Amino acid sequence: MKRTTLGLFIAAPLAGLMIACGASAPPPAPATATAAPSTPTLSATPTPTPTPAAAVSSIEIASLEDGEKYSYDPGKIVMKAGELTVKLVNKGVKWPHTLAIKNPAGGTDLFRSDRVKLGDSADLKFTLSEPGTYQIYCTVTGHETKGMVGTLTIVKG
């Protein structure tokens, strides 16, 4: 097999030179078939469904500002259904921020916090008993469009 491979590396450039000089190219060398080793087919890994073991009933979320881009950290949260506490930390930013939770069925807010002042934090307490994925966002004008959104997935506890 090495000989055939080496021959192809030499024959291919020579054929190009011969064609460029007006000569006809030699016939291609016969291909040799070798069995390729069997490899498993790779497929995309599905996104795992959050489990109650990964869920919490209390979490800390930081408000972040990077120029004109605002966000929450973390932006994807998994919590157990029931009484929940989110500590919204608003330190190292220029603006007050809030946290609101939209009802996925109707788009209305299920929960809305007051503004958290600069350099401050607030413990936000609310109850969500229905499993599902909810959108969280900042209600301060313009902050949602600057990217201050996230997801809150509620799982059975």
Image (tube, rainbow, N blue to C red):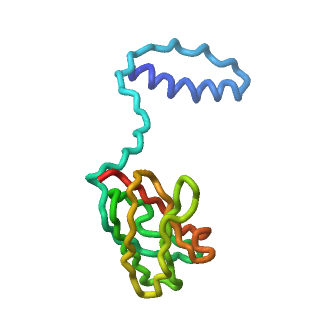
In this view of the protein, which residue sits in the foreground, 107 or 146? 107
Q: Position of residue 2 (x, y in %)?
A: 39, 23
Residue 44 position by quadrant: top left
Q: Position of residue 100 (x, y in %)?
A: 50, 69
Residue 45 sits above or below residue 19 on the image: below
Report how many numbered discs are placed on residues in the image.
0
**Residue in the image at 48% along x and 57% along y:** 134
Residue 5 sits above or below residue 65 on the image: above
**Residue in the image at 47% along x and 75% along y:** 113
**Residue in the image at 35% along x and 22% along y:** 37
Q: Which corner quadrant holds the N terminus?
A: top left
Residue 144 position by quadrant: bottom right
In this view of the protein, which residue sits in the foreground, 99 or 34? 99
In this view of the protein, which residue sits in the foreground, 5 or 66? 66
Q: In this view, which residue lies farthest toward the left?
A: 53
Please state if 32 lies on the left or on the right of 108 as rendered.
left
Q: In this view, which residue lies farthest toward the right?
A: 22
Q: Position of residue 89 (x, y in %)?
A: 40, 78
**Residue in the image at 36% along x and 26% along y:** 39
Q: Position of residue 36 (x, y in %)?
A: 38, 20
